[in-house]
Amino acid sequence: MEVYALVGPSGSGKSHRARVVAYDYDIPLILDDGLLIHDGKVIGGSSAKKENSRLAAIKRAIFHYSDHLEEVKKAIRESQADKILVLGTSIEMVEKIVSRLELPEITEMIMIEDIASEDEIARAIETRARENKHVIPVPTIEVKSQFLGYFIDSLKVLFNREEDDLARESTVVRARFNYLGGLIVYNKVFRDVVYYISDQADIISQLRNVRISKEEDGMTIFVVVIIKYGYVIHEALNDFKHNLANSLERFTGIDVKAINVEVAGMEVDKDDLSNNSSSR
């Protein structure tokens, strides 16, 4: 595996430009602030931007936690990628990350000054200081743009490379530890995800109500549903809750503490009743 590093001060625009660098160097994997990203999708890790303190964020970014470390090492192996781009605020930081993950020596060190002008870097740092905005180099909407909302904003990066004209979208967030104690994610985003996953669940006939309780350590979802006849209820609802929790955590970056499902009724198809009657 070839290892590339993109180095620049906090807020200098590394994450904004990471996808451009990855495109130019044909690098499928990006490692940024604890997240492992493969071709625009998060495949492992946990974002340092979710942490409640700067110290915890730094530890997360350099893979101090063993479970986080092992998860990302496994995801890198399973990706079978031949190149990876590691982002960091200093040469020492990226070297530490590479060492922790037991990656080969760095092939090329790219400094933010090599790909951005002094004015662009200064503007990025000023924006970070003023607005506390951070960029994660994955789309705000990874799979279903019609159902998923925004963290804070989305950012389009336009590539013009040898007749290719490709738009790449990144996500703008405010880190939990430096914006009023939490990421801003509007309730509509949560509801859109809940409704979408409910539509995909075979057992769910109707979603009657959704209530969301957000706290510092995560969120709790309360849903009222009408279910369909013919399923093993306990197993099917557990699958639904598991899929919903994974989707919410993946697409909003906020931990799900619990999902409580109230079954308000059951929908029985006439054909099911007829089949049951005829079998007696």
Image (cartoon, rainbow, N blue to C red):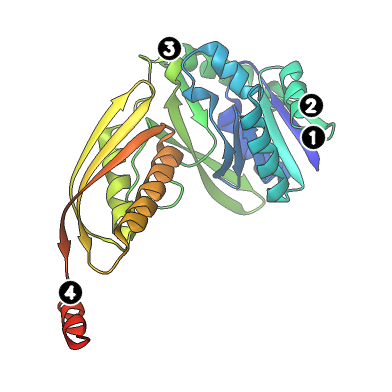
Q: Which mark is residue 40?
A: none
x then y, percent, for residue 163: 63, 54
Please report the residue visible at 57 percent of the width from the left and 24 percent of the height from the top: 13
Badge 4, how many Cα within 10 Å: few under 14, some, many 20+?
few
Please report the residue visible at 35 percent of the width from the left and 45 percent of the height from the top: 148
> Mark 3 sits on what residue?
130
| Helix, strand or loop for disc 2 | helix
Which numbered disc flags the more N-terminal residue, 1 or 3? 1
> Mark 4 sits on what residue?
269
Badge 3, how many Cα within 10 Å: few under 14, some, many 20+?
few
> Mark 1 sits on what residue?
103
Q: Amino acid at mark 1?
A: Leu
| Helix, strand or loop for disc 1 | loop
**Does the residue at mark 2 contact the one at mark 1 (Cβ under 8 Å)?**
yes
Q: Nearer the viewer, residue 79 or 71?
A: 71
Q: Nearer the viewer, residue 40 or 267?
A: 267
Q: Amino acid at mark 2?
A: Ser
Question: Can you say which quadrant of the picture contains the N terminus?
Answer: top right
Q: Is residue 147 above or below residue 121?
A: below
